[in-house]
Image (tube, grey):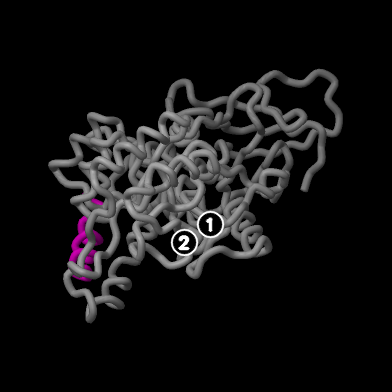
Amino acid sequence: MSDSGVLHIKGRVLVGADPDGGVRDELWAVDGRITFERPVGARDVTTVEGWALPGLVDAHCHVGLDAHGPVDESTAEKQALTDRDAGALLLRDAGSPSDTRWIDDREDLPRIIRAGRHIARTRRYIRNYAHEIEPDDLVAYVAREARRGDGWVKLVGDWLDRETGDLSSCWPRGEVAAAIAEAHRLGARVTAHCFAEESLAPLVEAGIDCIEHATGLTEETIPLFAERGVAIVPTLVNIATFPRLADGGERKFPRWADHMRRLHARRYETVRAAYDAGIPVFVGTDAGGSLAHGLVGQEVAELVKAGLPPLAALSATTWSARSWLGRPGLEEGAPADIVVYGTDPRADVRVLGSPKRVILRGRVIR
């Protein structure tokens, strides 16, 4: 780890998606902040060469959570370090029962934007993950998590209904609309886990800001999302697990298993149709439940496989993602959270899986 007072990045500094004005030749990090002005009289300058991007964004992960529920601080630390070493320096934690505020005091760990703890219907989500409540309590719990989080609240919008044997919506329209309005009043945005088709329109009409996974998007709901500007985080590396999940649950819930396979089969078509309609699409891995951390590069490659132009997929984890979350990129005075690659990631996004250097708060971490 470099403790140099001044860090010099030169080569190709990718400050935006604009092919004409989005590239600079160099930048400096002084006292952990970016400047494009050469420091006068600087000593002990460390130079890093390559293709520089703002620290990558994983807009859906779970630090402090594994397949069984909350984890200890040592495990949470390893999760955050794995993301950091993969170049993911800004994480939107989309629901965790663990208190990870201690991470904010660590100069060597990524920055986290928290959505508090998941809010789910009783017995309608993974055990030990969420507040499990009934609709009458939804507004109160949303207010609680809006105050606990960093500007986001996470709902479980649909899940397996054991009575019907298939995915179904979790919340009545009136209650969810009141809850979203309360979150907005408190200055928080709301997102929801949604696999199925039927849960989407009521949530969007209720004013939701984002949908996680969004595998149930159809020709009918895509225009609604586009009109309202509701973002999606497809988590395609997680959707890849649907066939295995379906195989495991088919004997007991055959309708659900068939539904999951159909959602999986059209996943790329769904994401491409959403992008073509103008729906904002952002990178998220869903790491921290059953998935490993550090998969941000793989998710970008999945978006390209789904049909997004490489530059759009790259922006979904860099410039546009940071703007959406209200965090700066490679700007004058911004924190120097930078990932450097040996070749142009715009030409082949697979290079994201092999960072040459990771720089956090102006320090070379690896």
Q: Mark 2 points at which residue?
A: 129
Q: Name the residue under label 1.
A: 97
Is 46 placed above or below 269 here?
above
What residue is at 66 percent from the left and 34 percent from the top? 336
Whether residue 303 is visible to the viewer of this picture, yes or no, is no
The reply to whether the C-beta atoms of the residues labelled 2 and 1 are less than 8 Å apart is yes
Can residue 260 be found in the magenta stretch? yes
Q: Nearer the viewer, residue 198 or 267?
A: 198
Q: Determine whether the residue tagged by mark 1 lies in a helix, strand or loop.
A: loop
Can residue 206 be found in the magenta stretch? no
Q: Determine whether the residue tagged by mark 2 lies in a helix, strand or loop.
A: loop
Q: Seen from this angle, which residue lies furthest bottom?
A: 251
Which of the 4 image quadrants contains residue 274?
Answer: top left
**Residue 164 horizontal/vertical position (percent):** 18, 67
Q: Residue 260 carries which label?
A: none
Few, some or many residues within 10 Å of mark 1 (<14, 14–19, 20+):
some
Q: In this view, does 93 lie to the left or right of 207?
A: right
* Three-letter amino acid code of the residue under disc 1: Pro
What segment is highlighted magenta in the picture?
256-269
Is 215 placed above or below 258 here?
above
**Residue 326 horizontal/vertical position (percent):** 51, 30
Q: In this view, does 348 lie to the left or right of 216?
A: right
Which of the 4 image quadrants contains residue 361?
Answer: top right
Q: Is residue 156 left or right of residue 272?
A: right
* Three-letter amino acid code of the residue under disc 2: Tyr
User: Magenta: predominant secondary structure element?
Assistant: helix
**Residue 2 horizontal/vertical position (percent):** 79, 44
Q: In this view, does 17 lie to the left or right of 221?
A: right
Few, some or many residues within 10 Å of mark 2 (<14, 14–19, 20+):
many
Q: How many labels does the image show?
A: 2
**Residue 145 horizontal/vertical position (percent):** 49, 44
